[in-house]
Image (tube, rainbow, N blue to C red):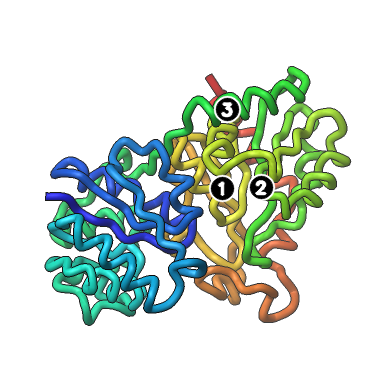
Amino acid sequence: MPSLVIQTSFLGDTILSTPLIAALAHAGPVDVVVTPLGATILRGNPAVRELVVYDKRGVDAGLRGIRRLARRLRAGGYDAAYLAQGSLRSAVLARAAHIGRRVGFDTSAGRALYTERVHYRRDAHHAERLWRLAAGDDAPSPEAATLRPHLYPGDTERAAVDALLAELPDGGPLVAVAPGSIWGTKRWPHVAALVSALEEVRFVVIGSAEDAAHAETLASAGPGRVLDATGRLSLLASAEMIRRCAVLVANDSAPTHLASGVGTPTLTIFGPTVPAFGFGPLAPHSEAIGVEGLACRPCHPHGPRECPLGHFACMRTLEPSRVAARVRNLLSTYPAP
């Protein structure tokens, strides 16, 4: 019988759900309830039979939207629902869809409506936490390859990247940088200095149209060797662009998980958050960097809009020379094929 995964959280969580989806697909068809944005990143995934779009903040908002989607899901005859997004709303949706087996975390807001609760392992990577919804608490620790997310850019995405890369002259290694984040304190402020320091490197700037100002600053720091891809690529095409790069330098944000999904070594910069929260890079040869020894770090599970103490030392004092040295080491140790 088919299974249903409900994942309507952040983009990174959606990407990190792909190992769970792959595990369930070994037993039968898997459908996934996702946001409109999440649907764009899971498109083409061979483990997914159907993407069920749930626009919870748009046309499907409120109880009316839950009832409408629940009626649609009842026809699916699902054996179980896996609540990868643990809100009460998601639990109500699964219950209203008459799915008898509902599996979620023991810490989730909707846990009272679950029929099975899996321990939320705070010391594990989130990809493993999600995978254990299918594997169970007692399953042995999985191999790293089992937990690696997978994304599947197609011909359209490859063509879009080809067209953009034609704008960049040939030269040194290509490094992707993703300077943005929806969380203000996750943005490392010295990316331009990094571009200036790595004179032998060509850069492509990954991000939405809202990151265009960052791209202009970086282009000024590295004239003739910075390609602005902000707002010019879909999410899957951005993943394809990252796949073409030797390294990605990113904040603790969605591009890190895009890189994990296509296997590009990543240097993730952590400021108010830390890798121990379970959202570090999973691509082979990836690393994390941050300012150690700060009593105030970590200060928030996601990253506050502003530094609670006003000094922003966790990001401000991370020197560009340290980051540049780590990038050079990755480039020399694991050169792009």
Q: Residue at x 25, y 75 (%)?
A: 106
User: In the image, residue 262 lies at what x, y percent?
Assistant: 46, 35
Give the side of residue 86 with respect to residue 203, left or right: left
Dot 2, how many residues are within 10 Å of its Cα: few (below 14), some (14-19), or many (20+)?
Answer: many
Where does the image place residue 12, in percent across and percent down from the top left? 47, 54
Q: Position of residue 120 (x, y in %)?
A: 28, 68
Q: CA distance from mark 1 to mark 2?
A: 8 Å
User: Can you identify the residue that label 1 sits on?
Assistant: 255
Residue that mark 2 sits on:
207
Q: Are marks 1 and 2 in contact (CB under 8 Å)?
A: yes
The residue sitting at 35% across, 75% down in the picture is 89
Q: Earlier in the sequence, mark 2 or mark 3?
A: 2
In this rendering, position of residue 117 left or right of residue 191: left
**Label 2 to label 3: alpha-carbon separation:** 16 Å
- Given residues 68 and 326, the one toward you in this image is 68
What amino acid does circle 2 point to? Answer: Gly
Residue under numbered circle 3: 244
Q: Is residue 203 above or below residue 70?
A: above
For mark 3, give the secondary structure: loop
The answer to whether 40 is drawn above or below residue 108 in the figure is: above
Q: Residue at x 23, y 73 (%)?
A: 96
* Vertical arrangement, residue 121 with respect to residue 241, above or below: below
Neighbour tally class for label 1: few under 14, some 14-19, many 20 plus, Cα within 10 Å: many
Marks 3 and 1, the one that precedes in the sequence = 3
Give whichever of discs 1 and 2 has the lower sequence position. Answer: 2
Question: What's the distance in space between the residues labelled 3 and 1, CA to CA?
Answer: 14 Å
Label 1 element class: helix
The kind of residue tagged 3 is: Arg
| Depth check, front residue: 173 or 287 | 173
Residue 52: name its quadrant: bottom left
Comparing 285 with 167, the one in front is 167
Q: Which tag is nearer the camera, tag 1 or tag 2?
A: 2
